Amino acid sequence: MSRRQVGSTRRGGSLPFVGVINSKSKSSPLVSVVLVVLGVILLIGYASRSSRSSGAFGGSREADSKIEGDFSCTAEVERAIPFLKKAYGDSMHKVLHVGPDTCSVVSKLLKEEETEAWGVEPYDIEDADGICKSLVHKGIVRVADIKFPLPYKAKSFSLVIVSDTLDYLSTKFLNKTLPEIARVSSDGLVIFTGYPGQQRAKVAELSKFGRPAKLRSSSWWVRFFVQTSLEENEAAIKKFEQAASKNSYKPSCQVFHLNSYH
């Protein structure tokens, strides 16, 4: 994204009142003091405004990427991998990740012993690095609209992990997309979603789905899982929480562990 530098408001290389202050007028000392004070106030206001403008045009790190910062559930997946391995054991041998920046998650999973990984990227990857493009070229990562059926057979993967995607879908599409994602898993489904309190951060970034994120409460998700006949995986929940507790790990996103369809 090109950044337009904020132009200076100075003209002719001088600031307001400088000419007045330096002029050889016969003003009284009191007037001169008042002008100096006004000039200092204007300079402070000018510097403050420039600082705010720099943030608006330069952009903060959080605004540059929809998955950076505390509300990034895809980044949270990477941090949670050691604890997911504790919870799922052998079920982590063939994993599919669905979400933005899936190349990063897949690359990290492939470094784990006895783990094969694939990914579905729901966004355009024109700006992806060479490693990501290589994964796409090899067919390990696919770019696909998750509102349509996934290009995999039923139970193709032991575990499917989803992040930063379902938050952008309306209930209409969730009713189709979530069962479809569950269809390709055999041993479990792990969903990372944002907390409602992170709404402000998410709304600042419109996704390529054309809508801001709709962050739902845990109770809403639990009801929705029941409606789609997906049961929570109590054994995995317990193991994950125990492993996280031992390492003082607290996810910054909601994490749901579900059983696959049988």
Image (spheres, rainbow, N blue to C red):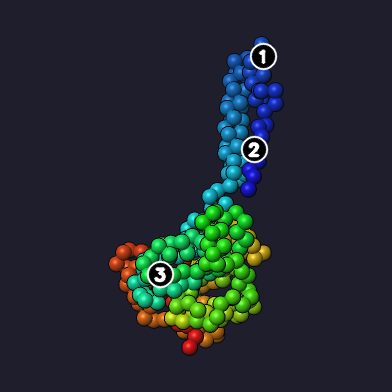
Q: Amino acid at mark 3?
A: Thr
Closer to the camera, 57 or 92?
Answer: 92
In primary-sequence order, the first of circles 1 and 2 is 2
The CA span between labels 1 and 2 is 30 Å
Q: Image quarter for residue 247?
A: bottom left
Q: Earlier in the sequence, mark 1 or mark 3?
A: 1
Residue linked to disc 3: 115
Q: Identify residue for label 1.
A: 23
- Nearer to me, 59 or 191: 191
Please tell me whether mark 1 or mark 3 is closer to you in this view.
3
Task: Establish if 35 lies above or below 73.
Answer: above
Q: Is residue 192 above or below residue 55?
A: below
Residue 208 image point, x, y percent:
64, 62
The outermost residue toward the bottom is 262
Q: Nearer the viewer, mark 2 or mark 3?
A: 3
Choose mark 1 or mark 2, whichever is in front.
2
Furthest-left residue in this view: 246
Q: In terms of image quadrants, where is residue 48?
A: top right
**Could you tell whether 101 is left or right of 110 in the image?**
right
Question: Dot 1: what SS?
Answer: loop
Q: Given the image, on which type of amino acid does mark 2 rest?
A: Val
Q: Earlier in the sequence, mark 2 or mark 3?
A: 2
Q: Would you call the spot at circle 2 few (<14 residues within 10 Å), some (14-19), or many (20 or more)? A: few
x, y percentage for residue 98?
A: 53, 69
Q: Are marks 1 and 2 in contact (CB under 8 Å)?
A: no
The residue sitting at 62% across, 61% down in the picture is: 124
State the residue position of label 2. Answer: 6
* Residue drawn at point x = 57 percent, y = 51 percent: 64
